[in-house]
Amino acid sequence: MNGTSEGPAAAADLDGSAVTESDIATPFRPDPPSHRAAFAAAPLAMAVVDREGTVVDANPAFGELLGAASEELTGTPAADLVDLASDTRTWHAYREVLRGRQAKLRCKRRLKHPDGHSMWAQITVTPLAGDAHGSPGVLLSVADITARRELQARLRHLQMHDPVTRLPNRTLFFERLTAALEPESYEQGGTGRIGLCYLDLDGFQAVNDTLGHRVGDRLLAAVAERLTRCADEAGHDRATAPLVARLGGDEFALLVEDSTGTEQLADLAESLLKAIQAPFDLSGHRMSVSASIGVVERRAAGTSATGLMQAADTTLYWAKADGRDRWTLFDPERNAHRMTRQALASTLRPAIERGEFRLEYQPLVCMEDGRLRGVEALIRWDHPQFGMLTPNRFIQLAEEDGSIVPLGRWILDTACRQARQWQLDHPDEPPIFVSVNVAVRQVWDSDLVADVAKTLAETGLAPHLLQLELTESAVMGSAGRPLQALQALSDMGVGIAIDDFGTGYSNLAYLSRLPVSVLKLDGSFVRGFQYEGEGVPPNPADEVVVEAMIQLAHRLGLTVTAECVETSAQASRLRRIGCDTGQGWLYSRPVSPDRISGLMGVQA
């Protein structure tokens, strides 16, 4: 047998790499006298082992490596000398080489010398060529790789640790995190949970910019010391302390394996904040800094390293947005809302082109006779994934990315066409006006005056049957181009209404200089008209404030619409103090165009 005629090449070594056919050395043939002399003089420790696994011959280097005379090793099981039976995989591979069914075995072992010191050895087992009397067995060689292992360990430490703080770096952190999320890690015992505190310093860049990077590095090192102290204290009664790592810049992470729940992570985050809040003395520079911390705690099963870090990063952003110098716990519901918002933002413009939007209309009713005078057009997004969405879910997104301009044109055109259609369908009834909400960005980013004129011309709707609503803060702060546009629209005959009046400037005197015709009182005023409890009268101050606003508006030639009218008692009080128009669920919720047709000519 030549050692290559049967069986696959290969047992794996200690670090998991496989041995291939190319690794197989030329079989050793100890034919006397020259080969025997070479065997004895070789600096590499070698031994000939028979098919039963017993040492039949060993060179002096082999005996020296193991601290015994080579003759004394004859007759000893080779596996005992170099620890080949310590794990099932290696032992099986060794037996396969002895039986001639495997070409080679190579593994690494930590061996103990009789004088007490330990060493790392690379062990190779290869078949020897047989002769007429059969195969003499295998050649076992042992190479001392202790120095190489120590060098590799030092290089790995340098590669895996941050030079400024001496903490584990991002690479080592993710290596530990990934290992902690492997099923064999959490299924062998423990809580089966994992926690993470993701931290960065508030305003750290200012330290680098004003005091220089050397002071900034000293601050990072000092912060690392305090974080490590907190981690050690947190792990005092546990098997292992949290792993502290610097992920880059001023970002740090503390990984808690086998966490016991959110309370443990919250206590750790609180201790981190307090530790960092204490002033730092850095070579004559005394400074105070704060940190924001995102906290995530969950079951390890089903969690990925990427998913955990995304959650931690999101939560850190929340802590920053909520005011800094605080920790924030991951909230799945808040995250779902954020993810939904991102999904909506990415599909908003295509949705306009696909025609996914609808208009509903809410009646505006005359307070005096209860008849329908107009409607407010309200946009809805019939989203294929999230269902019917109201404006508060997407209008701000549309304003942020500019899609409010094409969406606003669609709303204007659709609402005007519908108002004209109602007029044609009910020629015997007084025509109703349609009120359309307009964002300030529509005034700045498009020619709103031209858009309105074109729409009115194409639909045939009279200008006085169109009302445009802008928020109070937008109208009251108007100057330059927005004010010119509003004036041109008013000169055209289009009504201008201030929506949610009373929540912003509330500067009635300024109204006299604006082309405004209608005030829409914010619903918070109208809700104050409700009885607070059975038999408890409403606060008269609410009525005094609303009545004063209505009287002033009338003196300025403006009409007043009350929003959120929900009860007949509210309607009666508003009617008594002179409110012109009401809007709210007392009259109708927003409905489809055909439902509005049914309300025309009907007294509420």
Image (cartoon, rainbow, N blue to C red):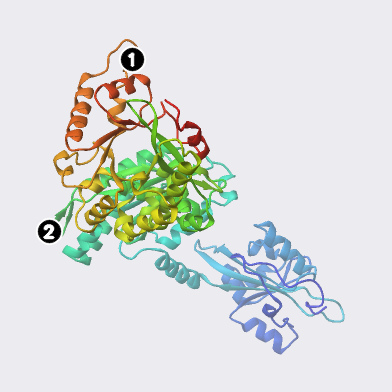
Residue at horizontal 64 percent and vertical 64 percent from the top: 81
SS at mark 2 in the image: loop
Tell me if residue 154 can be seen: yes
Q: Which mark is residue 284?
A: 2
Q: Position of residue 89 (x, y in %)?
A: 69, 60
The residue located at (16%, 40%) in the rendering is: 507
The residue beneath circle 1 is: 533
Q: Residues within 10 Å of mark 2 (few under 14, many from 20)?
A: few
Q: Earlier in the sequence, mark 1 or mark 2?
A: 2
Vertical arrangement, residue 603 with respect to residue 57, above or below: above
Query: In what element is the residue under mark 1?
Result: loop
Q: Quadrant of the N terminus?
A: bottom right
- Residue at the limit of the structure toward the top, as seen here: 535
Q: Residue at x 29, y 59 (%)?
A: 444
Q: Is residue 155 left or right of residue 533?
A: right
User: Residue 348: x, y in percent?
Assistant: 46, 55
Q: Characterize the local packing of mark 1: few (<14), some (14-19) or many (20 or more) Cα atoms within 10 angstroms.
A: few
